[in-house]
Image: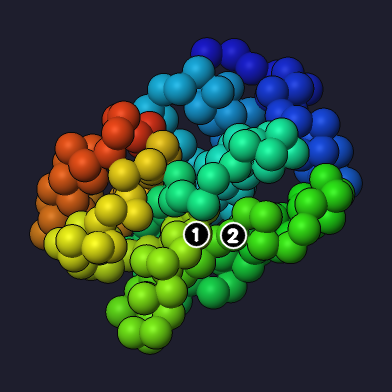
Amino acid sequence: MNASPTAALDLFHPVVRDWFLSRFAAPTGAQALGWAAIAEGRDVLVSAPTGSGKTLAAFLASLDRLLRRAVEGTVERKTSVVYVSPLRALAGDIHRNLESPLAELLVRAGLEEGAIEAQVRTGDTTPGARQRMVRRPPHLLVTTPESLYLLLTSPRARETLRAVETVIVDEVHALAPDRRGAHLALSLERLEALCDRRPVRIGLSAT
């Protein structure tokens, strides 16, 4: 599949496109090809070296969809994106690839803080924070394979996942060879059975 960087950026809302160009000279090859496939609603595996912008490729497509809804006033308080990483130390990567772009996009679009929310759910998340997520689900949920399993086994928590439209699995190369990967594969099937419609799967791998 061929996709030029310019054509790839034209897929986005003008606010998202202008934000990207204010931060980067042009999309990487992984981003341009990934966005084109994601826009078609296909399951996608983005396999490229570290530093090629894979995580932002997946997140930006999801942020674009949510931003369009927020601008139109149709965004709902439901979790529509689940990002799964085998790493519990997510803070730095998430700030760079999700929280910072999200905050800047909301300002550029003239939307209030919190119009689109992202939250992290891992084994370190406090019980109080977990309960708040059930009462007020984030639009984007960042979690680990183990925490996703626990969410799916909790009667109240799993109801917050029914509206999930996209599942992003990072570090596929680290998960695939072992039991964590097999366990996650079962969780993804359980999630698919739960959801109102089949979520699109986006895999990110360094090899």
Q: Which quadrant of the view contains residue 29? A: top right
> Amino acid under label 2?
Glu
Nearest the eye: 182 or 189: 189
Q: Secondary structure at mark 1?
A: loop
Answer whether residue 93 is visible to the viewer in this image.
yes
| 173 relative to 119 in the view: left or right | left
> Amino acid under label 1?
Pro
| 69 relative to 58 in the view: left or right | right
Badge 1: residue crowd in 10 Å (few <14, some 14–19, many ≥20): many
Residue holding disc 2: 117
Q: Which quadrant of the view contains residue 152? A: bottom left
Residue holding disc 1: 138
Q: Secondary structure at mark 2?
A: loop
Q: Residue at x 67, y 55 (%)?
A: 115
Q: Residue at x 52, y 13 (%)?
A: 1
Relative image position of residue 46 (x, y in whole percent): 46, 37
Relative image position of residue 110 (x, y in whole percent): 85, 50
